[in-house]
Amino acid sequence: MKTTSNYLFELVHSLSRNEKGYFKKQVMAHSQTPQEVQYLKLFDAIDKQLRYDEQELLEKFKDEKFIAQFSVAKNYLIYLILKCLVQFHSGKSAESNLNRELDFSHILFTKGFYKECLTQLTKAKKIAYNFDKHDYTLTIIKKEKQLVASLKSEKMIDDLQRLLEEEIKVLNMLKSESELGVVYYSFLNEIHKSRMRNSIVEHDQLNYLRRTVLPQLDSGSTFNSKNYYYGIETIYNYLINDFEKATQYGRLHRILWEENKERFEDENGDYLEIIYHYISSCIQTKNYEEVNQCLTHIKKLETHTKDQKQRKYFIYYTCKLRYCASLALYNESEQLLAEIENDADEMVNELYPAYKITLSINCAITYFVFEEYRKALQWLNSYLNTMNKVIRKDAYSFSRIFNLMIHYKLGNTDLLEHVIKNTYREIKTQTYIFEYEKLILNFIKKIAKNNSRKSVTLHAKALQAELNNLQNNPIEREAMRYFNFIRWLESEIQQIPYRTLTEKEIKG
């Protein structure tokens, strides 16, 4: 949990240049005492710090009155910043507009301007319906009831009955959307834990979860219902390896958002998550033209929050690396790696764990293809050293195997035996091990003991035949999609770079 000091430091540094300018103008214009203006000095001092240093601040402001109660001063500065941010962003989102309209209606009601209050509530209700803000709609209906009761017109009973029926309708929509939402977020959790499912039993479990609430959509379905429905179907079909259907629903999901500009502008952080799942499906179905269009669209997309910037960065670079790998566009891949390396401190290290894991593995694979094995190991270790086995379990399992392959290519013979033992120990603790993982593990173990050309070729050919047989098992086949192990074995047998074989196969 963040301390007040760290929270204040991060809050100050999260502000954009325009937000900082607005904050300073508001404090200068509305300060009631000279004491409040002094907080600008504290704000500027924190803004100039690269890392929070409280001792430096205490020394700098030792003659200021607020230093005697520095904890109170920090909390008050946080209050001032948040108060100004609310004003700065007022009217820029559906919820801020609704809150403003409700505040106006409350003032009008207390002043006795009932007709004007009703106009304000009608305006607010329209916004609430447009954005499926059912909790606000219920609040508005409650206020309308109070207004009807205060007016005491001849139609009071009829109006109250009408509002009651509307309230029941909204409650039913809220119930339906809430149930769908729980399943949708459950599927998001499932795909963040692992993008692979090891058995038909697990596929059946996902289908059971999906069927608990899945309705047939109709013309009266709300945006939220469609949003959850398409999201569930996209992720479900992706997890059971039906990528054609995942692409179909992903496209509908994308169109739903792009055709509703109001929602898109208001909540484009959610849109970024949606388009990521769609791109992932398109890569599996080799719909590369659509992938390229989506990536171009993402690159141009404006982001305003830290969350949106992180999502955009992660999605663009992860999917672009996969796109380039799929088409053997290695010159573009090199440029992408250079950009990622340049952004490592500012962006990559600040990514959410699930994002950092996925991007790190994609960088490691790309460097491996370029035969820059030390760089590949460096990126892989940035994930393995976190020892996070809960997020992306499939990635953790793959990374353990890939780690052995990198050490083998680096010629770390002495270290390899120790790494193999650790990998065996780790894999044994897992509930389920893919057959391909066992085979590659045994292959590395054999060639670690005898890495002569004859031995490597003999064992590589044997493993290649076994992996080819596994292609007949849909679950094993999809489990090997992160890296073309069969092509890598061919490169070991022929002593031709993996990159060269890939270019010949894809571009030929």
Image (cartoon, rainbow, N blue to C red):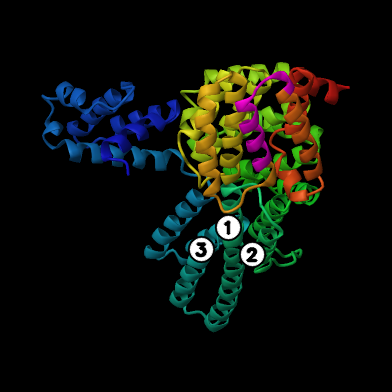
- Is the Cβ of the residue at disc 1 closer than 8 Å to that at disc 2? yes
Residue shown at 64% from the left, 64% from the top = 209
Q: Give the residue at x 41% y 61%.
A: 106
In the image, the segment drawn in magenta is: 437-454
Q: SS for tag 2? A: helix
Nearest the viewer among 398 and 240 is 398
Mark 3 or mark 2: whose residue is earlier in sequence: 3
Figure quadrant of the C terminus: top right
State the CA–CA distance, disc 3 to disc 1: 22 Å
Question: On screen, 360 above or below 93?
Answer: above
Q: Residue at x 60, y 48 (%)?
A: 194
How far apart marks 3 and 2 lie (CA) works out to 26 Å
Q: Which residue is mark 3?
A: 135
Number of other residues with Cα within 10 Å of mark 1, as a class: few under 14, some 14 to 19, many 20 or more = some
Q: Where, quadrant-wise, is the N terminus in this rendering?
A: top left
Q: Seen in the image, is 454 located left or right of residue 422?
A: right
- Is residue 302 visible to the viewer in this orientation of the structure? no
